[in-house]
Image (cartoon, grey):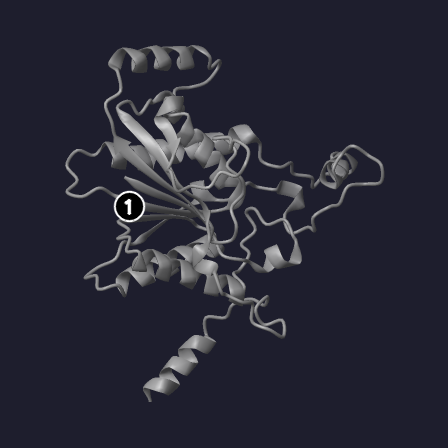
Amino acid sequence: MKLLLIRHGETVDNVAQLYAGTKDSALTVHGSLQADRLGQHLASIPLRVSHIYSSDLQRACKTAEAIRFAQKNQDRVSSPQVTQLCLLREQDFGFYEGKPFYTRVGESNKTGKESHRLEHLGDPAFKDVESKESMALRMNSFLEGHLIPLLMDKDRSEEPIVAIVSHGIILSVLWRCLLKLFIPWTVQFAPEVAIGSGSMSLEYLGGWSNTGYLELDILDEDVDTATVQRFDSERKGSVQNDKPSASHLLLSGRIMVIKTVNGKGHLKGLRRTGGGLGSSQFDEGQQKIETFFKKRKLG
């Protein structure tokens, strides 16, 4: 299986520096161009994507649709439909949804967000930020309900190529939940992955740029059965008060190769449209500049 964990294109709230977790922020013109570039890049490699999963928020859906559209236009009889899931939504920022990023207050060792939280904690309308535990439960549900059954399907005729289009924070949580399914030494970086002068932590590979992607290959490999059983037993024993979840389902006999971290080569040479247009909300009713000139040439 090849797995692509993809962040959506740039949004209006990204540009305005507003918290947008469950808030349904629209793509900018530039964000739509980023999504188109990504779709064209994947189709031209060529990667024949077999499954596309997306958050049901429009910034992710429209990025996923750009991937699907490019697949359809790459000499394919059919292209995969986008499966939209609320499970793949971004972290719920609660009270902060739609509010500006808060800067650190004076000499305080707390972030502006933490200070603001303490100040408004008693407000009747206050809703706290979604917890790490809640996000992990959602991602384990996605793994158990969608990805693992696909991976374990013995009747498939071809190895699946799966694109998951979601959001920066929740993708990091999904990655860590997926990582827990593997014995540590069966996860490795491909030789071509540049990890810098220091050692890159497997748990924290860094953030996702808009339309940046993490590319993973999950391969069958002979792993000693006794080693698998011992590791699985030790890991289960270290988890307390947890209901059985995807993190208890060891993908024995498989290795995972990290092929690309925050891939954004498709954005090379892409410049923001001037005059503020690039940062404005994308309007599907308007022609894109590239489409306009292509039609003029054809005529």
Residue 22 visible in rendering: yes
Farthest residue, direction bottom = 299
x 34%, y 10%: residue: 230
Q: Give whichever of 125, 112 is nearer the camera.
A: 112
Q: Relative to 232, is 127 on the left or the right?
A: right
Q: Relative to 248, is 115 on the left or the right?
A: right
x 23%, y 23%: residue: 222
- Above or below residue 201? Residue 296 is below
Q: How many marks?
A: 1
Quadrant of the rendered image containing residue 109 = top right
- Above or below residue 32? Residue 55 is above
Residue 138 visible in rendering: no
- Above or below residue 254? Residue 33 is below
Q: Which residue is mark 1?
A: 161
Q: Amino acid at mark 1?
A: Ile
Q: Residues within 10 Å of mark 1 (few under 14, many from 20)?
A: some
Where residue 207 appears, x then y in whole percent? 54, 43
x 72%, y 40%: residue: 113
Farthest residue, direction right = 107
Q: Give whichever of 205, 23 is nearer the camera.
A: 205
